[in-house]
Amino acid sequence: MDLAAAKQILDAALAYASEHGFKPMAIGVIDARGALKAYAAQDGTSLKRGEIALAKANGAVALGMGSRALMKRAETQGYFIAAATAAIGGSLVPVPGGVLVKDAAGALLGAVGISGDTSDNDEAAALAGIKAAGLIADPG
């Protein structure tokens, strides 16, 4: 994931959230190795939304599946998700809003994590940002 794509995802996700009247968002975009590429927190975002957004993205990259799939796994394999969360240093939030980003060939570029509104709305903003960048979204 290059910086230009990360910024495009971030800007488009924020625009989508604003257009749809979502609550203030925190958005983090990481690359395939988990390095932070872009981050923003809108005015009025609650204090820890940024950490939650990044944990959605980090968990997705660490386990190779979007956070919607991680939520499904948490429902049936709670011990696994708890152990995985501990193994990656606590940075895993298994609810929608952590979306893998892939190129047209299916190669993993990174992930977007968003927190601020409902988990479904967080995910919708991430999907819109990724689509605007011309990349493939995998929410799980």
Image (cartoon, helix red, strand yellow):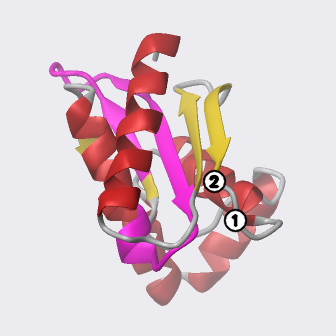
Residue at 52% in and 73% down: 23
Number of numbered discs: 2
Q: Which of 57 and 124 is in front in this view?
A: 124
Q: Establish if 98 lies above or below 130.
A: below
Label annotation for residue 45: 1
Looking at the figure, which quarter contains the C terminus? bottom left
Residue at the outermost left position: 104
Q: What stretch is highlighted in magenta?
A: 99-122
Q: Which of 76 and 7 is in front in this view?
A: 7
Q: Name the residue under label 2.
A: 42
In reply to whether residue 100 is colored magenta, the answer given is yes
Q: Is residue 26 visible in the rendered structure shown here?
A: yes
| SS at circle 1 | loop
Q: Which of 76 and 4 is in front in this view?
A: 4
From the viewer's perspective, tell me whether residue 82 is left or right of residue 10: right
Residue 136 is situated, as x and y percent measured from the top left of the image, at 22, 35
Q: Is residue 140 visible in the rendered structure shown here?
A: no
Residue 113 is situated, as x and y percent measured from the top left of the image, at 53, 51
**What amino acid is found at the position of numbered circle 2 in the picture?**
Gln
Specify few, some or many for label 1: CA neighbours under 10 Å numbering under 14, 14-19, or 20 or more.
some
Residue 109 is situated, as x and y percent measured from the top left of the image, at 41, 24
Image quadrant where residue 130 sits: top left
**What amino acid is found at the position of numbered circle 1 in the picture?**
Thr
